[in-house]
Amino acid sequence: MITVYGMSMSGNCYKLRLLLEQLGRDYRWVEIDSARGGTCTPEFLAKNPNGKVPVMELEDGRVLAESNAILCWLAEGAQGPHGNFLPDDAWLKAQALSWLFFEQYSHEPYIAVARFIRGWTPADSPRRADLPRLRERGHQALAVMERHLQSADWFSGQGYGIADIALFAYTHCAADGGFDLAAYPRIGDWLARVRATPGFVPMPDLDDEAVARLALPD
Amino acid sequence: MITVYGMSMSGNCYKLRLLLEQLGRDYRWVEIDSARGGTCTPEFLAKNPNGKVPVMELEDGRVLAESNAILCWLAEGAQGPHGNFLPDDAWLKAQALSWLFFEQYSHEPYIAVARFIRGWTPADSPRRADLPRLRERGHQALAVMERHLQSADWFSGQGYGIADIALFAYTHCAADGGFDLAAYPRIGDWLARVRATPGFVPMPDLDDEAVARLALPD
């Protein structure tokens, strides 16, 4: 059985939970509180010297880091509701990979980081000064997604797959970072399509402290 | 024949040039000056709505964005000097993908961006205030690479491959961003191994303006 070291409220970690549940895979989840130093312990750094969750561990102790690389490994040859979670066709697979890299370079660093600053840093954190710039760049990413959805239903080729999972992870909770998705109707429809896929599980509920912080103005 | 839309002095674009040369593939290179708005034209945005180079175009007009996704597509089944440029073995392939995501999330945003700010923004740019933070995070990435090289010669599995190409692109010119690599002897040895691979081509020379800016103190 595989083990996931993850923080339940992290979208990067939720990606793995969602795919594992939809694949019907057994797994063990070890909760790591990365907001309180859980990724900085010697034990954790021995698994991932880069100090980030999630990390996946095989029974023989081999480990794999980077959420989207773990999605690729889990999806290898795995059947989804509309075909493989990662297309076999080389061109469609390359397009799905392109969205996975887009997610980590042009989407997560703005939309997820804005959410993190609002929900997991003190109300007087100097990082809150970054929020306007993060919003501007995050909206650029959402606009790119909205445009893609003019001519496609999914980001993973002809059906739902791991590029959808990766982009869903932080898009569905973009409001936590102060993003209003009302201007992106196609994204709203796509989020609903993802939620309707077989075996879908939502992100676990936030703890009370995060909920209270997210309710505050910037 | 494929066409690459790229900026020659960009490491993300150089990745494709290096792999294409080592594969002996014919290609057409269309120079895009992203530092002077070349990625913001309607023609370019029609190819990549995310407004970034490189973009690869097939003869039939289909396009693929994201440097590391393009590397994956070009490497699919292609033989390198030590085996495939992307391992066939699922686990080794996942590890190579993990380094590709590491490069785009934990390396490029610090090491490449510090280089960009020093070489391609005015000497009085307010972005120069970001340099100390970028250096700190960039050194963390270099330390992760140095540690990996304690027990491995390459980042792409058992031999040279696309994860090495992706990491080489901005590591070899990290000094442009103000990073001293003297503290990373294993990285120095690995850079030499990459330069010794068959068909290696260096990044094109910088123009005089960039050279002059990079010679200035921060």
Image (spheres, coloured by chain):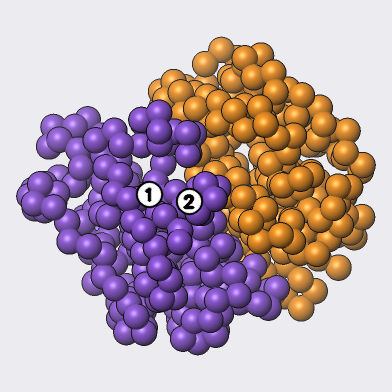
Chain colours: A orange, B purple
Q: Quadrant of residue A54?
A: bottom right
Q: Horizontal placement of B25 versus B170: left or right?
A: right
Q: Mark 1 lies on which chain?
A: B
Q: What residue appears at the point 55 percent right and 85 percent down from the top-left corner?
A: B83
Q: Horizontal placement of B178 versus A188: left or right?
A: left
Q: Which chain carries label 2?
A: B
Identify the residue position indicated by label 2 in the image: B57
Circle 2 sits in a helix, a strand or a loop, which is it? strand
Q: Tags 2 and 1 in contact by the CB under 8 Å rule? A: yes
Q: In which quarter of the image is residue A71?
A: bottom right
Q: Which amino acid does label 1 sit on?
A: Tyr
Same chain shared by disc 2 and disc 1? yes
Q: Position of residue A215 (x, y in %)?
A: 65, 15
Identify the residue position indicated by label 1 in the image: B5
Q: Can residue A89 be seen in this view?
A: yes
Q: In which quarter of the image is residue A107?
A: top right
Q: What residue appears at the point 36 percent right and 30 percent down from the top-left corner?
A: B41
Q: Horizontal placement of B89 versus B211: left or right?
A: right
